[in-house]
Amino acid sequence: MGLSTSRQSLTEELNEVLIVSLTPYFLERENLWFEKNLERILEARKTQSFFEDNTLFLERNQKYNFSQFLRKLDELGYEKVYQVSESGEFSQRGGIIDIFPVNLNYPFRLEFFGNQIISIEKLPLEIKNEKEIKERLKKKLKYQRIYFQLGQLKSGDFLVHLDHGVGIYNKKVKTNPEDASLSLGDGASNQEYYVLEYAQGDKLYVPVGLERKLSRYIGFLTPKISRLGSNLWQRTKKRVKEEAIKLARELLDIYAKREISMRPPYVPDDEIDFQLASSFKYSETPDQIQAIEDIKKDLEKNLPMDRLVCGDVGFGKTEVALRIAVKAVKSGWQVALICPTTILANQHFQNFEKRLKNFPIEIKILSRLQSKKEQRKIIEDLKSGKIDIVIGTHRILSKDIDFRNLGLLIIDDEQRFGVRQKEKLKKLRTSLDILSLSATPIPRTLYLALSSLKSISLIQTPPMGRLPIKTFIFPWSKKTIKEAIEKEILRGGQIYYLHNRVETIGGAKNFLKNLVPKAEIGIAHGRLKENELVKVMADFQNRKIDILTATTIIENGLDLPNVNTLIVADATKLGLSEAYQIRGRVGRSNLQAFAYFLYGSQLSEKAKMRLSALKESEELGSGYKIALKDLEIRGAGNILGKEQSGSINAVGLNLYCQMLSEAIEKLKK
């Protein structure tokens, strides 16, 4: 519902008004509190910087610099829109400002004549559910923290400002921008600013510390840069918001069946949970702890969980899954953990079996490694409920598998599974709890996670003692390969050599044998028989092999702390997420690891971008950013469908996802 701009509809004149910032402190309070405590707030403004910085008190006939007033609204966190309809918004037409303060149940209109407020009038729009509005605003602030990550900015990067649109980042400056045609902030001489360039030389100065309205532009075309101060951006946002609401309705229809499903809440923590946590030989990272808490809160509800845990390889996602699996078993459910490869399933089985050996929990592995007789026995025990946790490949999805009481499905490396396979397991019980683990989520999953249909927990804190992997992007050369291998073998380590063509992998092994004759070399690829593959990986794990010549099958390989050099023979053949994931196969200990991404003489523009992004994301915990960058490079494709591409290009993926999230939250009520 918009607001009428007709003078006849303005019904009540006001003499004074208080505007407070969009901060958690104020959003926790009911609007009646502000009325009761107005005198105390005004008194606090005189002596306490928090109240001075986060409130604005206006009176009719008061003189207030008009441009300073607009800056103050920005600092208080209000979003500039084409037409005000929600709490926390303002709009401007000449000297008329409509604003909807978060501390009032209605918006009002300020009219400036020069720098003087000549009238304050209440507008005919009133919110009915104050609590619901405040909750939505809290979520909006949370979304801004998730979406609006700037990371390492370079001159020429496109940035989106929530109130002013897409601009080109120039640099940071320490200067007073008061002489600029448009600026934000208090103009302090020692303030640092982001400088954004718009059409026809317009510049926007955004103070460091107030960049919450900035985000990277992620789109699939070069964005159109317009002038500052026009209504074009506000109209664009209005159109995209309307389209986001339309899509949100469609998505909510799809997920409605899941939302109305019910299941009993899981049992609370007890001695078993404490024993399991104390048997973990590492210190949990803060992000790990938060992810576990997030999931526990999901499971305390009577609605099914659908959560993605996104964290770099080796950052402790498996430990999170293990603890939640035990919680499910205690609550009377069976657990299925599905993995894309036999190697990974085998690794998980070994880890689970080792950690849970002192607990009364029955764990089995189901893959092509088991004999037909063993498989039949496991299938019978699953059906009768004798098995608590089953770990396996897509064999678990076969028609002959039936569970007695499946409650929790854990999907590791979910981008490796098709939607049809995942949907099949969901249909086993409409109230199935889903926990997805991924180091580089596919764009659609990322989008779903961020748009609040799927919850997301980010594990971005590296384990104690972990070092960033030194990454080198070099032309292919025998000398580079030989030196890298000899350097690693000299310190007693092992090497992955990635050659991603099964037909010629034998030749790659011979090439390495001639290059480093003393090294023991093994081969691993997907066409090997399962038992041969498991044996090769076991030999590599037991250090009988120095160099493993392999295809991308190692992307989901074992956790091997002694393997600390990776050589990729032709890096241009890998996608960005894939290259990032494979790089995470080394550096699993406190030793310095090295990754060499080699390329031939010809590099396409997209390959340059991928390799450049890989080098830029050398720091630990970059998987989440890599997924976004990968999305930027690959294009819209399979995300929301082509009909949404125009909206994404208009405002950028970050802002589009935020709008979609807000639309879904609003429609859910």
Image (cartoon, helix red, strand yellow):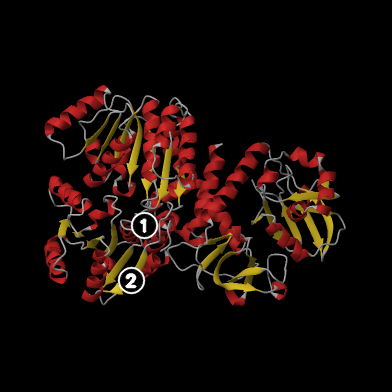
x and y percentages locating residue 434 in the rendered image: 38, 37
Where is mark 1, residue-wise? 637
**Circle 2: element type:** strand
Which residue type carries mark 1?
Gly
x and y percentages locating residue 242 in the rendered image: 54, 50
Q: 481 or 600, which lies in front?
A: 481
Q: Could you classify mark 2 by the number of other residues whose Cα lies within 10 Å: few (under 14), some (14-19), or many (20 or more)?
A: some
Q: 455 or 290, which lies in front?
A: 290
Vertical order, 663 against 487 (above or below)? above
Q: Look at 33% across and 71% down and name the residue there.
A: 473
Mark 1 vs mark 2, CA separation in Å: 28 Å
In this rendering, position of residue 536 left or right of residue 438: left
Q: Quadrant of residue 613?
A: bottom left
Q: Look at 44% across and 38% down and name the residue there.
A: 253
Q: How many marks?
A: 2
Which residue type carries mark 2?
Ile
